[in-house]
Amino acid sequence: MERRVRVRFAPSPTGPLHIGGVRTALYNYLFARQHGGDMILRIEDTDSQRFVPGAEDYINEALAWLGIGIDEGVREGGNYGPYKQSERRDIYREHVQMLLDAGKAYYAFDTPEELEAKRKEMANFQYDARTRLSMRNSLTLPADEVKAMIDRGEKYVVRFKIEPDRDVEVIDLIRGKVTINSSILDDKVLYKRADDLPTYHLANIVDDHLMEVTHVIRGEEWLPSAPLHVLLYEAFGWADTMPQFVHLPLLLKPDGAGKGKLSKRDGDKLGFPVFPLEWHDPETGAVSMGYRERGYLPQAVVNFLALLGWNSGDDQEIMTMDELIAKFSFEHCSKSGAKFDYKKGAWFNHEYLLREDDATLAQLFKPVLEANGVKPEEFGDDFITRTVALVKGRVSFVSELWDQGKFFYAAPTSYAEKDIKKRWSAEMPAIMEELIGVLEGIADFTSKPSEDIVLAWIAEKGYHLGNVMNAFRLTVVGECKGPHMFDVTELIGKEETIARIRRGIAEIKPIA
């Protein structure tokens, strides 16, 4: 019987979730949803020395913001818990003992000083079949001495006993068959008595098996550990339920040749986030920028990330989550790293802003208004929504709506010199006074009727259309650019429009 697809995203709570980790979570989610399977969030907190307060909550909040739904996890519960590795100690101890009893693992008592001395003695030293019989471990020490050392509470680790000179095959759904000879692998530490916790290698294998994970989808950097994991599955007798491996291409630096893994330093240098949410370091107080706080829409970030290392097989770029789920396939994943084109990310955000409901954008714009001293309640949701609709085509981020539309909320206090020089002649104040009279006589001040009357007046008087309209815009907006002029005047109203023209007449002086 075909197994139900079950995938897991297993981050460590050691800091903010990197955008590369977000893409891994996204690909897991797309694959699970496409196959009607389950998405597990497992917290790998066995490294107590690197635990960072707040990191686990950050991970959950980031995934929720992006719409990456979790079926089983610490918060969601499930039938395969606990979903936090620090709460699974008894399970790991049991499985360590299974390997020891089967002769697949052994105790090692070598001190850090002894290991360092061996590294100095032997070039490229590694703890393996060539060297383990010269070390202090249960393979070289009498059984009664080993028992006495353990009973005395001496520190030890448990190492996996890897048999040499065997070709280990890893079947990867992106890279095909990868073969690595076991002789290059060291006898990895699986358990440390000092911490009473397993290492990554043991904990992941045990958890993936017991949680019935069918596909392990993770970053390329974990590919070297895959042969070890194959051997561990075999050592436990679980080869028949071994998951399929998928190692995703790295996200690469955006500048230069794009070589090297994307880092926070790259984002700081070029001014883009590498974390989904803003992160406040609890130790240093340093603040790292996040996509959410920079004004990215979550659906834009998802679409952008999905196409870093994968393509849909056609020319479609803008895709909803449902479309991504329907189209996703490992067959179209790249084997090579994906250059992180952050400018393309901004383009995606622009495209999604254009498609977003104006009322929704208005709600997102309110904090920006407040940050600029505007009280949204004084203008109302309808007014804000209409201003957003007029300027959103000119921006990539919600924060930019202010620069494009601030004149809706306050009359200009200065005027663009280049526009004054080009459009404000000595006779323009008199023409603007005439315009005021025309505007005062308009009964229906909505866009189209106002436009028809003003343009007819300009034509009747024989004035230069471009000069008059740009001078009109200069007094109302402060510069000669912006949305359709009569859409602007309709929104701010007749009284405000005329007041701004009068102020412009008083303050703008021709520039020779």
Image (cartoon, grey):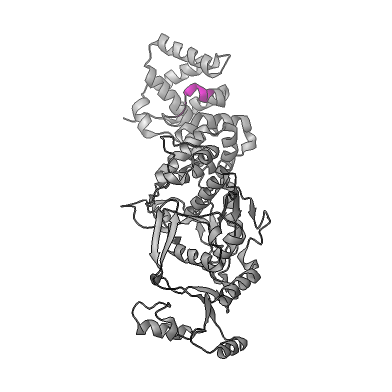
The magenta region covers 482-489
Quadrant in the picture for residue 156: bottom right
- Residue 511's spot in the image, x, y percent? 34, 31
Residue found at x 46% / y 51%? 273
- Residue 98's spot in the image, x, y percent? 59, 73
Asked whether 391 or 158 is in front, the reply is: 158
The C terminus lies in quadrant: top left
Asked whether 455 or 31 is in front, the reply is: 31
What is the residue that sits farthest to the top in this orientation?
Answer: 460
Q: Is residue 483 magenta?
A: yes
Asked whether 166 or 419 is in front, the reply is: 166
Q: Is residue 284 magenta?
A: no
- Residue 192's spot in the image, x, y percent? 55, 76
Residue 452 versus residue 133 in the image, above or below: above
Residue 106 versus residue 262 in the image, above or below: below
Residue 376 located left or right of residue 414: right
Magenta-colored segment: predominant secondary structure: helix
- Residue 287's spot in the image, x, y percent? 51, 58
What is the residue that sits farthest to the front in this orientation?
Answer: 1
Asked whether 473 or 109 is in front, the reply is: 109
Quadrant in the picture for residue 422: top left
Residue 374 located left or right of residue 177: right
Residue 87 seen in render = yes
Residue 427 versus residue 117 in the image, above or below: above
Q: How many marks?
A: 0
Residue 413 seen in render = no
Residue 295 versus residue 231 in the image, above or below: above
